[in-house]
Amino acid sequence: MSESELIILERINKIYHVGEVVIQPLNNVSIGIRRGEMVAIMGASGSGKTTLMNVIGCMDRPTDGKYILDGEEISKLHPNRLAEIRNKKFGFVFQSFNLLARTTALENVELPLMYWNSLGGRERRRRSAEALTSVGLADRLDHTPAQLSGGQQQRVAIARSLVTQPSILLADEPTGNLDSKSEKEVMGIFHRLHESGMTVILVTHNQEIAQHAQRVIRIRDGYIQEAAA
């Protein structure tokens, strides 16, 4: 695998034990994702794509195999160090927007920065307003989720994922709850982020969404079926 690859997975397995039952959602997975690439991980429900996303995003550790992220082997790191890497390098967007219902868009976006002791309240609000402006919601800072459409809520979630200035965006079925107009708007944001140099990874079962990517990685029953351009 080339030096330009930001993410390298080598022979990754993930095994869960549920009582006496052994479940293996990832089987000998080896892939590389280049810095600044826009990739879709595509598979049916139960194919292993969400587990793969969780491993890539440092939300879960492989049972065995090697994961090299930005030149660092992280497969066996302590959970605290993994959390540090996850919070620094990744932004996450999910199908369910995961917004706090009684807080404003600005306050929702500000949440990840609450753990940054080096930032004062004014700087947190400035960064959050800037993130919301970047997704076209400069006039919705004080609106709660109930006052926003589904597409606007997802854009708040995207702004929240961007406020820590990550280098990698992981989006899990990001348009699954959106109408076609909102889907187009959200995918437009992902394209702009990719064009700005961000690595964007879309996890989807939707062929139309996958077509937005430069490359599709197909997974079935925990095995990589296709990973070429």
Image (cartoon, helix red, strand yellow):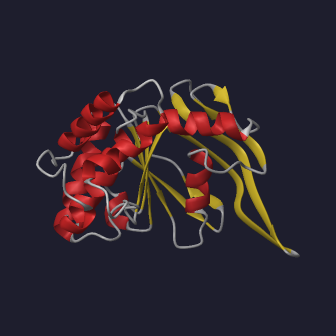
Q: Is residue 186 left or right of residue 63?
A: left
Q: Nearer the viewer, residue 21 or 9?
A: 21
- On the image, the x and y values in percent for residue 37 come to 41, 38
Q: Quadrant of the N terminus?
A: top right
Q: Is residue 116 visible?
A: yes
In front here: 184 or 142? 142
Q: Is residue 125 left or right of residue 227?
A: left
Examine the rendering and report whether any part of residue 183 can be seen.
Answer: no
Q: Residue furthest right?
A: 20
The outermost residue toward the left is 139
Residue drawn at (59%, 72%) of the image? 46
**Residue 48 coordinates in the image, percent (x, y):** 61, 64
Quarter assignment of residue 103: bottom left
Q: Quadrant of residue 180?
A: bottom left
Residue depicted at 38% across the width and 32% down the height:
165
Horizontally, is 150 left or right of 6 in the view?
Answer: left
Point 53% across, 50% down: residue: 227
Question: Does residue 19 lie above or below 139 as drawn?
Answer: below
Q: Is residue 21 above or below residue 217?
A: below
Q: Quick check: 111 left or right of 75?
A: left
Measured as percent of width and height from the top left, residue 82 is found at 65, 38
Which residue occupies 35% across, 38% down?
A: 163
**Residue 43, position as x, y percentages in the image:** 51, 66
How many marks on residues? 0
